[in-house]
Image (spheres, grey):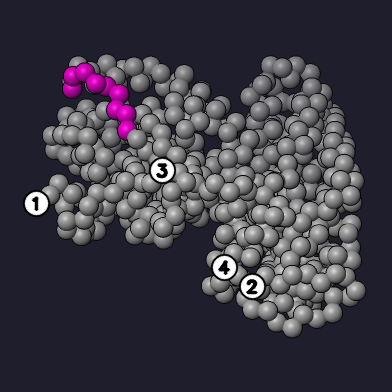
């Protein structure tokens, strides 16, 4: 019997006897497995959202300076910034596919700033802020943030009038042509359609005197138009449920395009109530199809949270790690730190650190054996480390370095990444985001020898609906479950 056929499978799933061991292809050679990383072609340029972030940050800083003695509360200022930025992101205030006016977003911006200051005021329980100081700080914050955002929007409006953003329109040709013609008639919206993507070339209607647009009927034509024109926005007209169109939209999202649904013929009313929309474009109601597309998953806010918390936790957990390492050295001998290659964002390998709780018989076993959580030959202290997840604390250094994030899909070894990518269609998509110490799957009990299919579903749901607030919720739930006796 070969060594490969004795490798235990996850969640008790049977293995095919005699299958050869495979490893993950290097980045750039993933064709044939459908892995969404390693592309050598360039992505379309993205409109930067950092100026809006800087405007909001400046408003936060100047608003905080209006509070006497604010320098004594740096953590509250950081909390205020994270709260406001997270709320703004939830309200799509960092979406760069449209350029609103200052009056358009005034209620949304000021309302979220007020909520942020209310949170700060609630936390200042020993020495509450006087109401006059709180109102003054909130007013300064609103004025600076709105003025800064309007300056950014005004500059973008001027730039878009001279050079509108290229876009593709996906849908039935008559409706898509009508939408494209309307966008051409209103150059103030800052969008220039460069083509219509359809399943088959239908009769092209009159576009109201505008120039005729090419009708793209194959995926290759659509990709070529996207690359040649630097398209970063795709508008979807009509249903996106067709297999061919759904595959195209997934491809566009992989290339970093923001996908928007435009209602070419909106109903006079919605019997289910108001639909979740994000304003309109040239009079067409629009809705973001991929919430994560307008804000990078590895955003500045997420990285700031990772660095701040991982650095603080490393300092706080340092004595615990030293005690665990010392006991482990006495009980189980030398070799306290366990290093193992894992696959991270975009299929890039990195070395993950843990406290060693098991000595594999060989490098092959370490790379291909699924789980050792129930091994009887582990010492009681090693079993304690695994039950309490204290052996995972060393991964905070991976987070601080940037190999991992606090929250994200759990990284896996190359052997299993290749195996699961062939078995589970959604598994490669987990690598769109930086790997994490904990995640949505883990707080739902999917740790150790559990269903890989379920993990894929929860991990991809987390990525598709990512928000900074969701990260905070998962961290709170993880902290509540930290000492629960579950395997890793």
Q: Is residue 339 magenta?
A: yes
The residue shown at (71%, 26%) is 128
Label whose residue precedes the other's in the sequence (3 or 4): 3
User: Which label belongs to residue 26?
Assistant: 3
User: As displayed, is residue 402 above or below residue 227?
Assistant: above
Please tell me how crowded label 4 is: few (under 14), some (14-19), or many (20+) other residues with Cα within 10 Å.
few
Badge number at residue 1: 1
Range covered by the magenta-colored residues: 332-340
Q: Which residue is mark 4?
A: 246
**Marked residue nearer the N-terminal end (1 or 2):** 1
Nearer the observer, disc 2 or disc 4? 2
> How packed is label 1: few (under 14 Cα within 10 Å), some, or many (20 or more)?
few
Q: Nearer the viewer, residue 160 or 148?
A: 160
Callout 3 touching callout 4 (CB < 8 Å): no
Taking the image as shown, residue 128 lies to the left or right of residue 356, namely right
Within 10 Å of disc 2 (Cα), the crowding (few <14, some 14-19, many 20+) is some
Secondary structure of residue under mark 1: loop
**Which quadrant is the C terminus positioned in?**
top left
Q: Extreme bottom residue here?
A: 203
- Residue matched to label 2: 217
State the image coordinates of residue 200 (x, y, percent, origin top left).
64, 78
Instruction: Please indicate whether residue 286 sits to the left or right of residue 392 in the image.
Output: right
- Closer to us: 487 or 400: 400
């Amino acid at each position: 019997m070969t060594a490969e056929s004795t490798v235990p499978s996850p969640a008790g799933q049977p293995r095919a006897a005699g299958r050869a061991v495979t490893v993950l292809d290097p980045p750039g050679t993933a064709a044939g497995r459908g892995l969404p990383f390693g592309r050598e072609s360039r992505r379309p340029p993205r409109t930067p959202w950092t100026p809006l972030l800087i405007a909001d940050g400046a408003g936060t800083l100047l608003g905080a300076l209006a509070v006497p003695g604010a320098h004594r509360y740096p953590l509250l200022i950081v909390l205020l910034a994270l709260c406001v930025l997270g709320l703004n992101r939830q309200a799509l205030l960092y979406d760069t596919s449209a350029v609103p006016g200052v009056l358009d977003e005034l209620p949304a911006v000021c309302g979220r700033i007020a909520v942020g200051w209310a949170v700060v005021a609630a936390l200042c329980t020993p020495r509450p802020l006087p109401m006059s100081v709180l109102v003054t700080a909130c007013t300064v914050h609103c004025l600076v943030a709105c003025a800064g955002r309007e300056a950014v929007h005004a500059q973008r409006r001027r730039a878009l009038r001279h050079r509108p953003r290229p876009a593709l329109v996906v849908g039935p040709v008559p409706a898509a042509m009508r939408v494209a013609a309307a966008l051409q008639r209103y150059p103030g919206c800052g969008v220039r359609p460069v083509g219509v993507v359809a399943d088959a070339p239908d009769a092209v209607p009159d576009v109201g005197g505008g120039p005729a647009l090419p009708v793209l009927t194959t995926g290759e034509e659509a990709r070529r138009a996207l690359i040649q024109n630097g398209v970063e926005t795709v508008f979807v007209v009509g249903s996106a449920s067709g297999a061919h169109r759904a595959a195209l939209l997934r491809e566009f999202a992989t290339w970093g395009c923001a996908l928007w649904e435009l209602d070419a013929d909106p109903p006079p009313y919605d019997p289910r109530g108001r639909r979740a929309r994000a304003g309109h474009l040239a009079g067409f109601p629009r809705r973001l199809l991929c919430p994560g597309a307008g804000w990078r998953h590895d955003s500045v806010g997420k990285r700031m949270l990772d660095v701040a918390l991982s650095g603080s936790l490393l300092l706080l957990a340092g004595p615990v790690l030293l005690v665990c390492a010392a006991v482990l050295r006495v009980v189980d001998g030398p070799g306290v730190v366990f290093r193992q290659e894992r696959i991270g964002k975009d299929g890039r390998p990195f070395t993950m650190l843990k406290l060693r709780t098991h000595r594999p018989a060989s490098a092959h076993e370490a790379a291909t054996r699924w789980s050792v959580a129930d091994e009887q030959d582990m010492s009681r202290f090693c079993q304690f480390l695994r039950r309490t997840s204290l052996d995972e604390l060393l991964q905070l250094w991976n987070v601080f370095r940037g190999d991992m994030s606090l929250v994200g899909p759990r990284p896996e070894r190359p052997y299993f990444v290749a195996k699961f990518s062939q078995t589970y269609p959604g598994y490669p998509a987990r690598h769109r985001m930086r790997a994490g110490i904990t995640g949505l799957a883990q707080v739902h009990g999917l740790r150790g020898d559990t269903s890989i299919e379920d993990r894929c579903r929860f991990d991809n749901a987390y990525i598709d609906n990512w928000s900074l607030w969701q990260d905070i919720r998962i961290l709170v739930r993880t902290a509540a479950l930290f000492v629960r006796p579950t395997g890793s």
